[in-house]
Image (tube, rainbow, N blue to C red):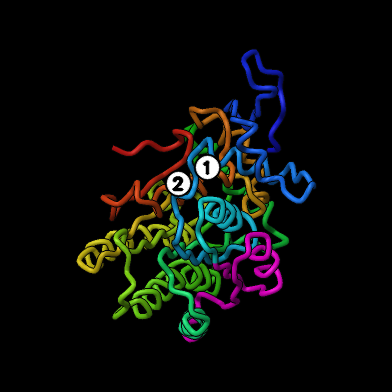
Amino acid sequence: MLPEFIPSNKNSLLVIQSGDRNFEPDWHKSLSVCISGTIDLSLAIHKILNEERQVDRLHGRTALVTGAARGLGAQIVRRFAEEGAHVIVNDLNLTAAQETAKKYNGDAFACDVSNSSEVDRMFLDIAAKGLEIDILVNNAGISGLEGDNQAQERVRKSLKVAEASAKGEIPDIDPPILEVTDSAWSKMLAVHLDGTFFCSRAFVKNYRGSNSLNGLGRAIINMGSIMGTSGGAGSAAYCAAKAGILGLTRSLARELAPFKVRVNAIAPGYILTDMTSPMAEMFPLLVAQTPQGRLGDPDDIAWAAVYLGSEEAKFVTGQTLSPNGGWHMSQ
């Protein structure tokens, strides 16, 4: 959302309205960024907003975000960069990764995270460029609906199961698990669970022996899902993969704490992205089940990642943070 200018009732000439916050900055001070006789208003606004909300929580840190050319990953990259981090964008598509990285003066590397050899090579290439990763965000994933011309029908079947369950009835369709092929099951676990493990292992392997570890230590942030804790009809492979990630997170948190590495997970609720768009028919039901009355947006997840990567979370490890609007409430 672009900032809006609104009249001020105080001494400032204008107030900047961004989202649900109003800022009345010191314009004479902030506009000093305009140099050479050319007023770069966007730069001035960026500086003003940064001054007001005290950014740079990730200053001096280098972060690798996997699956970051678009969607949740791209938004995490954006917020990390705005908070002062040097960002490294990973994606299967190198061109797409480079386009995202270019926006934030970052670096881009391509690899299939489900292939351990490719992952190891990527981390070696990153190190060869003189980059030392402080924060790893294991975000790469698939929904299982990509390129599936039966995606809408699969969603409708899942919806039928949910509706029948709510009424205490037996659905008039076969259980969705019967349509899960061996290859679909294996691919889901490979991308999500194997990918998270391979990248975490390579991350640890490459920082081991480093003398430049700063006072904050390092952080691994794994992308789980609310489905990994609550389950979901028609999503057996996805739920199993995400539940595995949450278990891996807790195990690595205990294992790596003595080495000054924090490991946490984010378990998003239902977020509006390209990946969830095939589920559009289920959105009204999901919104009705969510106390906040809306689905999430990528920024809800990006800010959670910023927190877990920052000094604010220095005593947090082995935890799962679940921005879900109240759809699921844990004990």
Query: Residue, x 62% and y 40% (percent of image)?
Result: 282
Query: Residue, x 32% and y 64% (percent of image)?
Result: 214
Q: SS at mark 2?
A: helix
Amino acid on which disc 1 is placed: Asp
In the depicted view, which residue is nearer to us: 285 or 253? 253
Amino acid on which disc 2 is placed: Ala
Indicate whether residue 113 is drawn in magenta. yes
Q: Is the C-beta separation of discs 2 and 1 under 8 Å?
A: yes
The magenta segment is: 88-117
Q: Quadrant of the N terminus?
A: top right
Q: SS at mark 1?
A: helix
The percent coordinates of residue 215 (x first, y second) are 29, 60
Q: Quadrant of residue 249?
A: bottom left
Q: Is residue 20 left or right of residue 316?
A: right
Q: Is residue 55 visible?
A: yes
The residue indicated by pointer 2 is 304
Query: Residue, x 58% and y 32% (percent of image)?
Result: 294
The percent coordinates of residue 4 (x first, y second) are 71, 30
Indicate whether residue 73 is drawn in magenta. no
Residue 278's tag is none
Query: Residue, x 38% and y 62% (percent of image)?
Result: 220
Q: Quadrant of the C terminus?
A: top left
Q: Is residue 175 visible?
A: no
The residue indicated by pointer 1 is 300
> Badge 2, how many Cα within 10 Å: few under 14, some, many 20+?
some
The percent coordinates of residue 240 (x first, y second) are 42, 60
